[in-house]
Amino acid sequence: MRASVAALIAAGTLTLACGSQPAPASPSNAAPASPAPSDATDLTGTWSGSGTDSYSPERVKWVLAQSGSNVTGTAELTPMDPADGSCASCHKLRKGTVSGRLDGATLTLRMNFPAGGDVPTPICVTDLTGSASLTGNRLTGSYSGTDSCEGVFANGQLSLTKQ
């Protein structure tokens, strides 16, 4: 019986040695782990800052929502000095929408301020298009467009920070 047990143990050891799987790779010879895919940038939230163009400077506020690469939200322009008596104190007081598409770190955008509403110039329509680059929590970009009462907005620059 002792010979049988010894033979079984020897056979079992041989089976384990021959039929076993290779030892797992050690950290020194393991393949490098691939980087985890990064999450898509989400612009959802409130953004505020300033802008300026051929017409005048303004404060800018966006409240954005993002679905995939599509961005939509509200846009509000306010004059730097609403009491200065200039045309900008009226025409830079606008409420409307912002929409766009995010591709990597570049947002292609449109701001539209329709006629009507509780603004001093309710008959005027402002339509602006442009693009902005995202770096961290900051969007910087350019825009141009038209206002049905005032004409062309050219050389627009904006700088917004996520709140």
Image: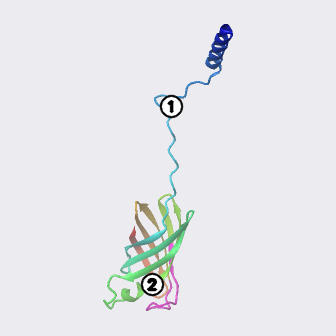
Q: Earlier in the sequence, mark 1 or mark 2?
A: 1
Which quadrant of the view contains residue 5? top right
Report the residue at 44% width, 62% height from top. Answer: 133
Q: Which residues are magenta?
A: 110-125
Give the Cα separation between the discs numbered 1 and 2: 60 Å
Image quadrant where one finds the C terminus: bottom left
Q: What mark, if any, has residue 94 been given in the picture?
A: 2
**What percent of the width, then of the height, locates residue 119?**
45, 90
Report the residue at 63% width, 19% height from top. Answer: 16
Image quadrant where one finds the N terminus: top right
**What percent of the width, then of the height, locates residue 51?**
38, 74
Question: Majority secondary structure of the magenta segment?
Answer: loop
Q: What residue would you read off at disc 1? A: 30
Q: Is residue 88 above or below residue 15?
A: below
**What percent of the width, then of the height, locates residue 34?**
52, 41
Q: Is residue 51 above or below residue 8?
A: below
Q: Amino acid at mark 2?
A: Arg
